[in-house]
Image (tube, rainbow, N blue to C red):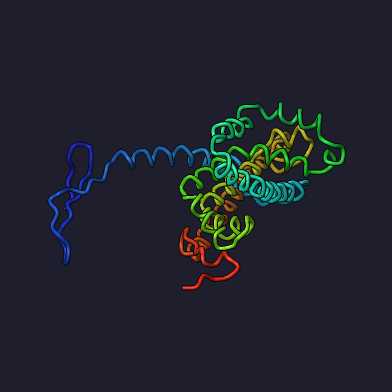
Amino acid sequence: MAAVIGDEMVERVAPGPGRRPTAGLRRRPVWRWVILLVVGAFFIIPLVAAVRFTGFSSFPAVFHQDGFSAAFELSVKLAAITTAATLVLMLPTVVYVHLRLPRLRRLMEGITILPIVIPPVVLIIGVLQVAPGFLKATPYLLALEYVVLAMPFAYRAFDAGLRALDLQTLVEASQSLGAGWGTTLWRVLLPNLRSALLSATVLTVALVLGEFTMASLDLYQTFPVWIVNFDQTSGPISVAASLLALVVTWIFLLAISMIGGRRSRRAGGAEVSLFSVGRRPMAR
């Protein structure tokens, strides 16, 4: 039975077979639905307005515009390179700080927040002044710049994941079974940091696919730069390209989340057996 008390909807829980009767009420606050509807309208209304402005006929035309395929391919390549470099650099660094330099956590938090505090214009100008010539002629310089921008998000994702683990015990148990640092990191810590790894990957990919300032100042036409440049000639096509970029980003993030979720379920959650990290299995 359902009843309304004040401004909240409540439902009486009837006793079933094998279930104790409860005299309490299961509350379903109405304000949660109100907040959900307001937030949904805040995101959906601009998208609907953009679709009405551009028209459905503009979406197929985006793929036939000059420079679309090259700009999109460059953005995807930069996202892959940046994500790989960020994970390879940040994960061992955060693990080492947690194990050997725990007093420097506050300092590391302050250092890693600098790319958010310092404007991207200042960062790119400084990088262009000191970068070697062979890097300036390749998009790899832009990928390294994106690694710096992604550092605050990746560091905090790994830091939160390591705080949830008994890191010292896991490392000592792994080393007592004969595993080296590489094996410990790959076969013990990494399976227990799947959620943190997934969060860092999602944040990095979203950052690269939406960054405009550094790419434009570095004179590379990534997908966001192409959209802004094309806006000067055709407004509907530019809006359609922006919507496609949003949809493509959602698809990438959803695919990453699904892949990470399936691997976590196959691994049986976040647990990993320490008997498999040593050179020889322990005798029972």
Q: Is residue 139 visible?
A: yes
Q: Is residue 97 left or right of residue 89?
A: left
Q: Position of residue 220 (x, y in %)?
A: 78, 39
Residue 31 found in image quarter:
top left
State the count of labels: 0
**Is 110 rendered above or below residue 220?**
above
Q: Is residue 62 visible?
A: no
Residue beneath the point at 48% across and 63% down: 265
Q: Position of residue 77 (x, y in %)?
A: 72, 50
* Residue most extreme to the right: 133
Q: Is residue 76 left or right of residue 131?
A: left
Foreground residue, 158 or 41? Answer: 158
Residue beneath the point at 46% across and 64% down: 268
Q: Position of residue 177 (x, y in %)?
A: 55, 63
Residue 125 found in image quarter:
top right
Residue beneath the point at 73% across and 37% down: 215
Q: Is residue 53 left or right of residue 228?
A: left
Q: Is residue 245 left or right of residue 33?
A: right
Foreground residue, 260 or 100? Answer: 100
Residue beneath the point at 66% across and 49% down: 88
Foreground residue, 102 or 157? Answer: 102
**Is 188 rendered above or below residue 237?**
below
Residue 174 found in image quarter:
bottom right
Foreground residue, 74 or 40? Answer: 74
Q: Position of residue 253 (x, y in %)?
A: 57, 51
